[in-house]
Amino acid sequence: MEITPKIAECVGLWLAEGDNKTKYEITFTNNCLVLVKLFNQEVISKYSGNPRIYIYSRERNIEFELDNCAIKQYMDIRANKPYFVLRLASVKVVRDWKIIVEKVKKNPKFYADILRGFFAGEGNIKTGSHSNRTIRIAQKQPTEWVNNILDFFGVSYSFAERERSYVITGSWNWKKFAEIRLADLHPQKKERFWSVYKSFKEEHYPNNYIKNKLLKRLTEPCTTKELAIDFNRSKARINDVLCSLKEAKIIRKFNIRSNTFWIRNDSNKIIISDVKRNYLDLLEGNRTSDIAKLLNVCWKSANRRLSELERLNLVVQDKQTLWKIVPTIKEIIVK
């Protein structure tokens, strides 16, 4: 059998709802007709044999047809909704099918498809107060291949022993699942997933996410506006994080005309304007009044710029009031 994305989805369905312990038949149980028909079309019908489908309901009068399947109906007073058990008995078929299952589980090419099928069987979506939106995948205990797939897509998750399920929250995770159409295989789950996903009004991030990303970015000078655009946050929100980092003496800011540039302290870089660059070029051996004349500005303006350069430890005034450049190993960036 050629392994296709549809086959990989059926592998996920079977791992969720099939009997993977028996050696004598392929079995798939579900109460969703769409999934039952998909599994029959993509898997059962590809093998020779005598497939059967058992329908369990309270009234035992379900009208249903499935290609090449013998249909038997039984009464189950516990069934709030009819459910179906699809079976194909064959030791050889089971052996071949399990080989396909193992191949799909190990191939990253099919990770999205197998997870989509598995969620159709074992997944659910929970919402509650305080904008609680949770994706859950039921399992008795953490499973290695599920862990591998979630890690592959960069999904952050926890496993709740009491609930016996994976618990996944946060819009960044929902966004990743939206990209691989996690819930699209099951009609009801698909509708619920996209309804909840559209309810996210603002991009939310895990604790310290923005702070950590900012620190990686600020090896080079950036303005608040640039960072706000990159992180899809308001300038006020970005500024709050930047100020907290500045108070912790991790980063520093440089005011260049109407812009504020931020950079990490350990970057060993100083940011100045092109105006201050002109002062440095004319500085050596001149007094404030000399520099003011050369630049055609008033003494007060020249003194203010020189004082700013002095605070940056780039210049110093000697006893004869002559300005001199202070040697520095820091890189000077002109903006």
Image: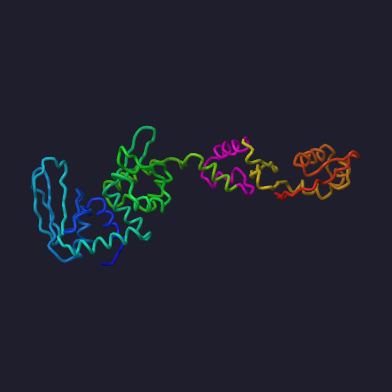
Q: Quadrant of residue 105?
A: bottom left
The number of discs equals: 0
**Is 20 on the left-hand or right-hand side of 221?**
left
The answer to which of 177 and 335 lies nearer the viewer is: 177
> Is 243 in the magenta?
yes
Q: Quadrant of residue 27?
A: bottom left
Report the residue that reaches farthest toward the top.
Answer: 129
- Residue depicted at x 80% and y 41%: 306
- Residue depicted at x 13% and y 55%: 53
- Residue depicted at x 41% and y 42%: 170
**Is 19 on the left-hand or right-hand side of 276?**
left
Report the residue that reaches farthest toward the right.
Answer: 320
Q: Position of residue 212 (x, y in %)?
A: 54, 44
> Is 190 in the magenta?
no
**Is 228 on the left-hand or right-hand side of 121?**
right
- Residue depicted at x 63% and y 37%: 246
Q: Position of residue 75 (x, y in %)?
A: 8, 45
Residues drawn in magenta: 218-247
Q: Position of residue 103 (x, y in %)?
A: 31, 62
Dominant SS type (magenta): helix
Q: Position of residue 82 (x, y in %)?
A: 15, 46
The answer to which of 227 and 151 lies nearer the viewer is: 151
Give the position of the N terminus as an image quadrant.
bottom left
